[in-house]
Image: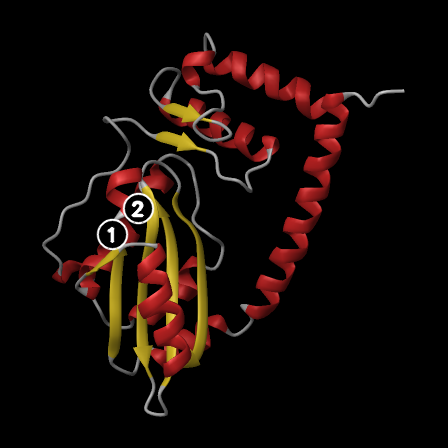
Amino acid sequence: MATDPKKRQKKMERRAAKRKEKKHALVRQENVGLGERMTAAARFPVLNCWIGDSIESDGIGWIALSREFPNRQVAVVSFLVDRYCLGVKDFFAEVLGRSSYDDKYVRKMLRDLPSHDAPPADARKYLEEAVAYARSLGLSPHADYTKAMRVFGDIAAADSQATFEFGKDGKPFFVSGPNDTPERCRKIVTMLTNTCGPGNFHFMIGGPDGPGLDDYDSEDEFLDEEDDLIEQ
């Protein structure tokens, strides 16, 4: 008997969710002591600070800051920022040797993810304002965001004169990522409906070829369809 495509899809999504949870468990384990490590790193000079070009062009990208210890170890934190809607979606932090850092970040990361040098105060302001924008929509940043931000130490956002815009065309715009399950997408659209009101935000599910708000008569139609998928 042929397998029901919808059931097969849901099975694949459950497997992906399990893999994601295992990955998150490893990340949580690695993040034990994260705040203390970033507080220690903040005592030393800033080595690099970058803002990804794609944040402005595509609404999502990386902001990274690194500091070098006297023993030539480097602490680096990269924040994944969604300025259209979700604020700080994720981050990655590590301490590695200077040569490994130069290879992984200065060469490979900048090659694959074009970025520009930025004053650390601008980077902190961008991150804090992105989080504030998302919070105004009822959306919280990554759970360990506050700990990761300790890498900035006494760098103050107030010292920045830069201005940043959030949302797209004056409205929040939620674009689902590859790891966003149907349940998570539904929760975000529900939150935006409650905080912004129907018609006051946009969304796109599943990438450029996936459904967006224009494919439904209303947010409620999308939510009803997602309820049907989740229940199957």
Q: How far across and how far down the image is residue 196, in percent?
A: 36, 24
Identified at 34% across, 49% down, the residue is 61
Q: Amino acid at mark 2?
A: Ala
Evaluate whether residue 179 shows in this view: yes
Amino acid residing under circle 1:
Tyr
State the residue position of label 1.
126
Describe the element under mark 2 as helix, strand or loop. helix
Question: Residue 110, position in %: x, y?
Answer: 31, 61
Residue at 49% across / 24% down in the picture? 210
Side (left or right) of 1 relative to 49: right
Provide residue 28's location: percent of width, then percent of height: 59, 63
Residue highlighted by disc 2: 130
Which quadrant would the N terminus be assigned to in this image? top right
User: Which of the 4 quarters of the picture holds residue 135?
Assistant: top left
**Residue drawn at x 41%, y 65% as measured from the top left:** 148
Badge 1 vs badge 2, beta-carbon distance below 8 Å: yes
Furthest-bottom residue in this view: 71
